[in-house]
Amino acid sequence: MVLSRRPPVVTWQHVYCGLLSAVYALCIVMGAAFLLFRNELADAQNPAVGFVVMGVIFAGMGLVFALAFGIAPFLRPAPWLWVYHLVLICLGMTSMCCVPFCVPLLIFWIKPETKAYYGRS
Protein backbone atom coordinates (compact mmCIF):
# COMPACT_ATOMS: atom_id res chain seq x y z
CA MET A 1 0.00 0.00 0.00
CA VAL A 2 1.45 3.35 -1.07
CA LEU A 3 0.38 6.43 0.88
CA SER A 4 -0.85 9.43 -1.07
CA ARG A 5 0.79 12.01 1.22
CA ARG A 6 4.50 12.31 0.55
CA PRO A 7 6.79 12.69 3.60
CA PRO A 8 9.06 15.78 3.49
CA VAL A 9 12.19 13.60 3.49
CA VAL A 10 11.27 12.37 0.01
CA THR A 11 11.50 15.92 -1.32
CA TRP A 12 14.87 16.39 0.37
CA GLN A 13 16.04 13.07 -1.06
CA HIS A 14 15.10 14.29 -4.54
CA VAL A 15 17.08 17.51 -3.97
CA TYR A 16 20.04 15.42 -2.77
CA CYS A 17 19.81 13.22 -5.88
CA GLY A 18 19.65 16.26 -8.15
CA LEU A 19 22.69 17.87 -6.56
CA LEU A 20 24.77 14.71 -6.70
CA SER A 21 23.79 14.03 -10.29
CA ALA A 22 25.04 17.55 -11.10
CA VAL A 23 28.32 16.85 -9.29
CA TYR A 24 28.77 13.63 -11.26
CA ALA A 25 27.93 15.47 -14.50
CA LEU A 26 30.86 17.76 -13.66
CA CYS A 27 33.01 14.63 -13.30
CA ILE A 28 32.03 13.71 -16.86
CA VAL A 29 33.09 17.17 -18.02
CA MET A 30 36.37 16.88 -16.13
CA GLY A 31 37.02 13.45 -17.64
CA ALA A 32 36.35 14.82 -21.11
CA ALA A 33 38.73 17.72 -20.41
CA PHE A 34 41.46 15.28 -19.39
CA LEU A 35 40.94 13.35 -22.62
CA LEU A 36 40.78 16.43 -24.87
CA PHE A 37 43.72 18.30 -23.35
CA ARG A 38 45.95 15.35 -22.45
CA ASN A 39 48.83 16.56 -24.61
CA GLU A 40 48.69 20.08 -23.19
CA LEU A 41 48.58 18.74 -19.62
CA ALA A 42 51.37 16.20 -20.11
CA ASP A 43 54.90 16.85 -18.93
CA ALA A 44 57.96 14.79 -18.00
CA GLN A 45 56.46 13.50 -14.74
CA ASN A 46 52.90 13.07 -16.00
CA PRO A 47 52.68 11.44 -19.43
CA ALA A 48 49.63 11.84 -21.65
CA VAL A 49 48.58 8.23 -21.13
CA GLY A 50 47.99 9.01 -17.45
CA PHE A 51 45.50 11.71 -18.39
CA VAL A 52 43.77 9.29 -20.76
CA VAL A 53 43.35 6.79 -17.91
CA MET A 54 42.11 9.49 -15.53
CA GLY A 55 39.76 10.86 -18.16
CA VAL A 56 38.20 7.48 -18.85
CA ILE A 57 37.80 6.76 -15.13
CA PHE A 58 36.29 10.17 -14.34
CA ALA A 59 33.95 10.14 -17.33
CA GLY A 60 32.91 6.52 -16.82
CA MET A 61 32.22 6.79 -13.10
CA GLY A 62 30.58 10.16 -13.60
CA LEU A 63 28.24 8.72 -16.21
CA VAL A 64 27.24 5.73 -14.08
CA PHE A 65 26.60 7.76 -10.94
CA ALA A 66 24.97 10.69 -12.74
CA LEU A 67 22.47 8.25 -14.25
CA ALA A 68 21.95 6.41 -10.95
CA PHE A 69 21.23 9.62 -9.04
CA GLY A 70 19.52 11.39 -11.94
CA ILE A 71 16.78 8.84 -12.60
CA ALA A 72 15.88 8.23 -8.94
CA PRO A 73 13.56 11.24 -8.43
CA PHE A 74 11.53 10.36 -11.53
CA LEU A 75 10.65 6.80 -10.55
CA ARG A 76 7.26 5.99 -9.02
CA PRO A 77 7.18 4.88 -5.37
CA ALA A 78 7.64 1.13 -5.01
CA PRO A 79 9.08 -1.10 -2.27
CA TRP A 80 12.32 -1.68 -4.17
CA LEU A 81 12.75 2.07 -4.74
CA TRP A 82 12.97 2.69 -0.99
CA VAL A 83 16.00 0.38 -0.92
CA TYR A 84 17.45 2.04 -4.04
CA HIS A 85 17.27 5.46 -2.38
CA LEU A 86 18.77 4.01 0.80
CA VAL A 87 21.73 2.75 -1.23
CA LEU A 88 22.13 6.22 -2.81
CA ILE A 89 22.18 7.82 0.64
CA CYS A 90 24.80 5.31 1.78
CA LEU A 91 26.91 5.96 -1.34
CA GLY A 92 26.92 9.64 -0.44
CA MET A 93 28.22 8.78 3.02
CA THR A 94 31.50 7.65 1.46
CA SER A 95 32.38 11.33 0.99
CA MET A 96 33.02 13.51 4.03
CA CYS A 97 31.51 16.44 2.12
CA CYS A 98 28.15 14.66 1.93
CA VAL A 99 28.02 13.14 5.43
CA PRO A 100 26.41 16.22 7.05
CA PHE A 101 23.55 15.91 4.52
CA CYS A 102 23.33 12.12 4.42
CA VAL A 103 23.07 11.48 8.16
CA PRO A 104 19.84 13.49 8.64
CA LEU A 105 18.48 12.03 5.39
CA LEU A 106 19.22 8.53 6.65
CA ILE A 107 17.62 9.18 10.04
CA PHE A 108 14.38 10.36 8.46
CA TRP A 109 14.54 7.84 5.60
CA ILE A 110 14.28 4.81 7.87
CA LYS A 111 11.18 6.11 9.66
CA PRO A 112 7.98 4.07 9.29
CA GLU A 113 6.07 6.79 7.41
CA THR A 114 8.71 6.88 4.68
CA LYS A 115 8.69 3.10 4.39
CA ALA A 116 4.88 3.15 4.22
CA TYR A 117 4.97 5.76 1.44
CA TYR A 118 7.07 3.34 -0.63
CA GLY A 119 4.88 0.37 0.26
CA ARG A 120 7.29 -1.31 2.68
CA SER A 121 6.13 -2.53 6.05
Image (tube, rainbow, N blue to C red):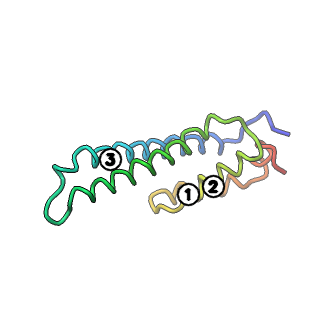
**Residue type of the residue flagged with mark 2:** Val
In this view, the mark in front (3 or 2): 3
Whichever of labels 3 and 1 marks the residue nearer the N terminus, that label is: 3
Marker disc for residue 91: 1
CB within 8 Å, label 3 to label 2: no
Query: Please, which residue is most extreme toward the bottom here?
Result: 45
Image coords of residue 71 (percent x, y): 58, 38
Alpha-carbon span between mark 1 and mark 2: 6 Å
Q: Amino acid at mark 1?
A: Leu
Please tell me which of labels 3 and 2 falls first in the chain: 3
From the image, tell me which residue sits under label 2.
87
Which of the 4 image quadrants contains residue 104?
Answer: bottom right
Residue sitting at x 37%, y 51%: 56
**Closest to the observer, 60 or 65:** 60
- Along the horizontal axis of the image, is 75 left or right of 38? right
Q: Is residue 10 found left or right of 117 in the rendered image?
A: left
On residue 30, the disc is 3
Q: Mark on residue 48?
A: none
1 vs 97: above or below: above
* 52, above or below 67, in the image: below
The kind of residue on which mark 3 rests is Met
SS type, badge 1: helix
Task: Please say if the residues under marks 1 and 2 sit with CB atoms less than 8 Å apart.
Answer: yes
- Are there few (<14), some (14-19), or many (20+) residues within 10 Å of tag 2? few
Percent position (x, y) of residue 52? 30, 53
Q: Give the residue displayed 71% in from the left and 41% down from the top.
A: 7
